[in-house]
Amino acid sequence: MRRVDSGQKTYTRKIGLADTLRAAGPYADHILIGESNHENPDILNALYGKEALVTYAEVGTTDLYLEIHTKNQPAIDKLASGKISTREEFTQALKDSGMYLNDTIEDRALVDQLYTTTTMASKLGISVHCGDHGNGFDEMKKSMLANAQFALEIITSEENIEAERAFHKARTNDSQTAEFMNATSQGKSIAIWGAAHGEQKDDWDEKLKGTAIKIDIYASREDYAKAMEERKQINERLGMNIGEDPPEMVYFIKEGELRISDKTPNAIRLAVNEASSPLEIQIATQDIPRNPTSTAPSPSPLNL
């Protein structure tokens, strides 16, 4: 289902994230959530906490898709079916399926997140799917090698940029994810991926059966501004237009505010308006340069 880009004028409402999902849920077969930071605790709690999962169930979600490689599905299935029950068993099952884990804070947090999400979702009747098919992984390795070669003056700046460009193109093309969701969804789905996904033309939501809407989640307006500046710099350096198909809505956790664009379906806009209060200041989406030429050194990559 192609989301129609009818413009980028926006307005902002005061509303909780749960109420936002409850308002949009009845009018969308698929809700794509852009996780702008995979490690921010406020975002993780907002998307994987008890309230979030209960809300997903309330809006009729049958399938929850996570940006975890498909090879880890056996571990998820064992936990969901009760074949294993403890975190230790689950950790071992993930290792057995090929997930590389060390006893670090980050790895323990990831395991805990997957464990609690899967166990609670299962109790709520929601199937959890590992939906990342590894698109862009090979290109990422080539880009990392090219960056090292460029630092050693083995290859040119143009060759280094081309490798990074190939990575971003491959990683943000989620056609295979859409095919997977079409084949496995039992009704209504929520997919949580990095915020750069689903924001290119004909990349993901356009290939889904049924209606789809995308909501990007940021910890604060300040974080959003930084992310948009970083994206602008990447676009300028690579000559790309990452974000050419922006989300219908953007949510800011700290402020408790939802920015709504005029490409949002009318039914959802009306439902959100009824469940929220208005803000006087309207905020316009910043355009991202489409024909840049900069060849500056690479900054940190987008949260893909």
Image (spheres, grey):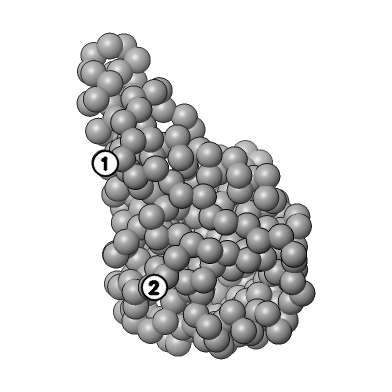
Judging depth in this view, the residue of 189 and 133 nearest the camera is 189
Up the image or down, 261 lies above or below 226; here it is: below
Q: Residues within 10 Å of mark 2 (few under 14, many from 20)?
A: many
Judging depth in this view, the residue of 262 and 23 nearest the camera is 262
Q: Residue at x 61, y 48 (%)?
A: 224
The reply to whether residue 78 is visible in this rendering is: no
The circle on residue 150 is none
The reply to whether residue 270 is visible in this rendering is: yes
Percent x, y for residue 201?
Answer: 32, 61
Among the 4 quarters of the image, the one containing residue 277 = bottom right
Q: Is residue 268 left or right of residue 253?
A: left
Q: Residue at x 49, y 33 (%)?
A: 300
Percent x, y for residue 256?
Answer: 75, 62
Report the residue marked by disc 2: 3
Q: Quadrant of the N terminus?
A: bottom left
Q: Residue at x 62, y 84 (%)?
A: 270
Pointers 1 and 2 in contact (C-beta within 8 Å) = no
Judging depth in this view, the residue of 190 and 112 nearest the camera is 190
Circle nearer the viewer, 1 or 2:
2
Name the element at disc 2: loop
Percent x, y for residue 140?
Answer: 33, 39
Percent x, y for residue 178?
Answer: 34, 70
Q: Is residue 108 left or right of residue 198?
A: right
Q: Amino acid at mark 2?
A: Arg
Report the residue marked by disc 1: 166
Q: Amino acid at mark 1?
A: Ala
Q: Earlier in the sequence, mark 1 or mark 2?
A: 2
Name the element at disc 1: helix
Among the 4 quarters of the image, the one containing residue 200 = bottom left
Q: Residue at x 68, y 80 (%)?
A: 273
Q: CA distance from mark 1 to mark 2?
A: 25 Å
Up the image or down, 227 lies above or below 193; here it is: above
